[in-house]
Image (tube, rainbow, N blue to C red):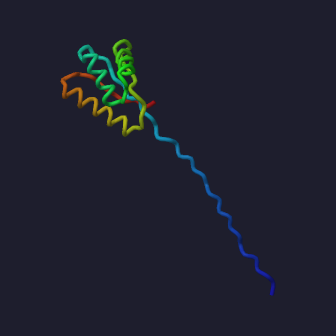
Amino acid sequence: MGTRKQNEFVLEAKRTRTRPPPLYKVLLLNDDYTPMDFVVEVLQKYFGMDRERATRVMLQVHREGMGICGVFPRDIASTKVEQVASFARQHQHPLACVMEEN
């Protein structure tokens, strides 16, 4: 009787690269009615900016028509847009906050 050779199987780990989720910019849009101080408050409260940075972004919104508040995964960006919209409505301001894919 001869020796039987066992079949050998080599399993290689297949590496799959998952792409990070798409990121979204959250933007404030300028209007002629929302007070500048309210915009600064929103940027501090919902985007964690210090007063100086919030003021710079508010001025960008005022001068250029929009300003970037931050870049986030979709769920976080969507939540921030809703929080800002709700806060603005509570204070009867027409401040618009939108998100767009980065």
Q: Nearer the viewer, residue 61 or 48?
A: 48
Please, which residue is most extreme toward the top here?
63
Identified at 26% across, 13% down, the residue is: 32
**In the image, residue 28 lies at what x, y percent?**
34, 23
**In the image, residue 45 lies at what x, y percent?**
30, 29
Residue 40 is drawn in which quadrant? top left
Q: Nearer the viewer, residue 53 or 19?
A: 53
Q: Nearer the viewer, residue 101 or 84?
A: 84
Count how many numbered circles sit on residues in the image. 0
Q: Describe residue 1's horizontal placement relative to residue 42 as left or right.
A: right
Please, which residue is most extreme toward the bottom here?
1
Identified at 32% across, 37% down, the residue is: 79
Asked if 11 appears above or below 98 in the picture, the reply is below
Identified at 71% across, 70% down, the residue is: 8
Q: Describe residue 42's horizontal placement relative to residue 92 as left or right.
A: right
**In the image, residue 5 lies at what x, y percent?**
76, 76
Identified at 57% across, 50% down, the residue is: 16
Q: Nearer the viewer, residue 91 or 78?
A: 91
Q: Quadrant of the C terminus?
A: top left
**In the image, residue 84 lies at what x, y percent?**
28, 29
Q: Quadrant of the N terminus?
A: bottom right
Residue 57 is drawn in which quadrant? top left
Residue 42 is drawn in which quadrant? top left
